[in-house]
Amino acid sequence: MSVHATKELQAYWKENLVIIMVHLAIWFFVSFFCGIMFVDQLDKFMIGGYPLGFWFANQGSIFVFVILITTYVYMMNNLDKKYDVHEG
């Protein structure tokens, strides 16, 4: 493998890890803080007739996780195209 290809591969994985870490940080924040730590503060607000903290613990975190999956796929497809490692 050439030096140029090695540097390009390292840049690809560096950007890949940044995308993964950002998504994991959002996932952790929503599931841990919004679903556990800030429940009392969030329960002061209502959404769909339920306290917001309860909603986040049961429904909201699932919606956020689906959004994270969608954005991860979109961002990785763009990254693959940028480094010409995409499929098809």
Image (cartoon, rainbow, N blue to C red):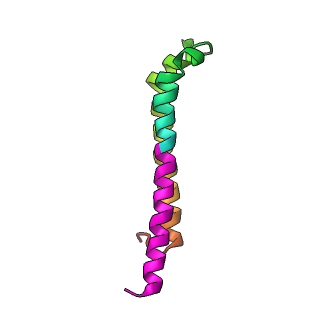
Residue 33: % across, % down: 51, 28
Q: State whether residue 20 is above or below residue 43.
A: below
Q: Is residue 47 at least partly visible in the picture?
A: no
Question: What span is colored magenta in the figure?
Answer: 1-24
- Point 58% across, 18% down: residue: 42
Q: State whether residue 62 is above or below residue 88.
A: above
Residue 36: % across, % down: 46, 22
Q: Quadrant of the N terminus?
A: bottom left
19 magenta-colored: yes
3 magenta-colored: yes
42 with respect to 59 (left or right): right
Q: Quadrant of the C terminus?
A: bottom left
- Point 45% across, 32% down: residue: 62
Q: So how many labels did they put on this image? A: 0
Residue 53: % across, % down: 53, 19
Which residue sits furthest bottom? 2
Along the viewing direction, whichever of 10 and 88 lies nearer the viewer = 10
Residue 21: % across, % down: 48, 50
Along the viewing direction, whichever of 59 and 23 lies nearer the viewer = 23
In terms of image quadrants, where is residue 45?
Answer: top right
